[in-house]
Amino acid sequence: MSKYENTMPQFPEPIWRTQLELPTYSVLNKDHETEVVVVGAGISGITTAYLLAKEGKKVTLIEAGKVINGTTGHTTAKITSQHDVIYDHLISHIGLDRARLYYESNEHARKFIENLVKQNNIHCNFEKHDAYLFANTEEGIKKLKTEAGAYQKLEIDGELVEKLPFNIPHKKALVMRDQAHFHPVKYLTALLQEMEILGVAVYENTTATDILEENDKKAVVQTSNGHKITADFVACCTHFPFFDGLGFYFTRMMAERSYVLAVKTQDAFPNGMYMGVDQTSFSYRSILQDGEKIVLLSGESHQTGQGIPTHQHYEALLKEAKKSLKLERILYRWSAQDLITLDKIPFIGKLTHKHDHILVATGYKKWGMTTGTLAALIITDLILGRENDYAEVYKPQRFQADPSDIKQFIKENADVAKHFVSGKLDKPSKHPRSLNKDEGCAVTVDGERCGAYRDSSGELHIVDTTCTHLGCETEWNSGDRTWDCPCHGSRFSYDGSVVEGPAKKPLKRVELQ
């Protein structure tokens, strides 16, 4: 047995859903009419449904799986406007005024969460802390100095500092004061409980697959079990939009995975949130659980479906935990998927300029607690016909013809073509019957590329590895036991069921003769 198997939990599981009694909801089993249907029960969807219900709207919230179990359930839950080194980039790309609006909008969302927690006495481990970026290389220090200049231009409460309160190697750091973190599932569970009082209809295991029609007054959502939901407005808060509407979102965003360990340490962990900006860097924060401080160590980002075997990313986190945190024990491990737009600004607003009744929220990079909350605030105002000071910055129809964005767009789509072609040419030599227990890989069955996984009981699960979105070949994710698409980020369970979009249909099952 390897060191990895000896020290890691066998299966990925985020810390947030453990030791909690979570609400459950029924499946939608008939056609349904409402004023607003919100699709997706993460922080964007739940907050949107909550806000609209508070305004007196008849709201229905549907979720393909379980509530708060998608990206929001796999976050590190930092409520911060310090989104890595971004503000100098924004000033250069969208100008000083819009960069300031980006900062102010995220601060607005952070304060909204803080006020809601206080007003409703929500017990969700909300804590205010400073957030730090730190560097050890000359290149990283240069980034921090440039970003500090952007902080000054935007009047951000922060500055360069020489010393962190955290005993890890660093030569320079940039602090943003009065940020926060919390327990996202406890927070959103409280909102769900309030929504029940407000009369919001919530349905789990109800997958939206299409929007059948949209006219001047109504839109009709189709679900996978054949039922329809008719509404005045549809809010797509599904991480990746379940309906594209010729917005071509899959060409305008990149899917990226990152990894998290929740660990107990021998040494006390200081207050604060810490994130490195060097090429190989990690992020740290803590949470109090059962009176003990648990440290969340995250990092090892890569494009979905590409790169080294994914269990090696967990091993890299383990190595870092032993080195920098004096590791005592690993409690949980999990990974998360984030969508990144070309200009690094989320898409929030009307799906396209032709869709007045369909709104979308996606592309949060790694900062969904603030931008997901902001999305709910913007979408609520758009549905209610109110002006929103920040909507223009995030509208999906924006087009900033920056040369670096165009270059990145060309690069990403060329990369898709490369993986599409190489996947089709791959003919693995391995046969499914040769797999050991808990082993998965690409195999050949009857001359065709397939994917196989033998579970711990010895049963084989064989699928056609062709992604049901646009036909790229998926790759085995050994860390999470999934089939991941390197083209647009779709993910499937080892049995072929959809884990993440844009794919809507499962991988085809293959029977071994």
Image (cartoon, rainbow, N blue to C red):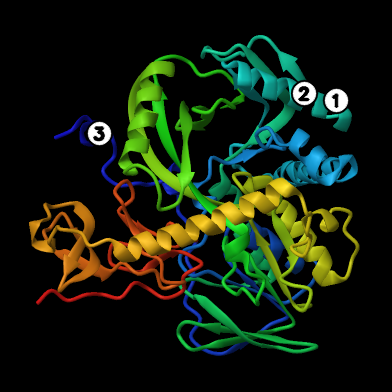
The answer for how far apart the CA atoms under marks 3 and 1 are is 45 Å
x and y percentages locating residue 397 in the rendered image: 77, 65
Q: Residue 85 falls in which quadrant of the image?
A: top right
Q: Which residue is mark 1?
A: 152
| Front in this rendered view, residue 211 or 18 | 211
Q: Residues within 10 Å of mark 3 (few under 14, many from 20)?
A: some
What type is the residue that disc 1 sits on?
Gln
Q: Residue 353 falls in which quadrant of the image?
A: bottom right
Image vertical order of residue 77 relative to residue 255, above or below: above
Q: Secondary structure at mark 2?
A: helix
Q: Secondary structure at mark 1?
A: helix
Q: Which mark's residue is nearer the viewer, 3 or 2?
A: 2
Q: Residues within 10 Å of mark 2 (few under 14, many from 20)?
A: many
Q: Quadrant of the C terminus?
A: bottom left
What type is the residue that disc 2 sits on?
Ala
Image vertical order of residue 402 relative to residue 299, above or below: below
Q: Secondary structure at mark 3?
A: helix
The answer for how far apart the CA atoms under marks 3 and 2 are is 39 Å
Q: Which mark is residue 148?
A: 2
x and y percentages locating residue 282 in the rendered image: 50, 28
User: Which residue: 79% across, 87% down?
Assistant: 217
Q: Residue 202 falls in which quadrant of the image?
A: bottom right
What type is the residue that disc 3 sits on?
Tyr
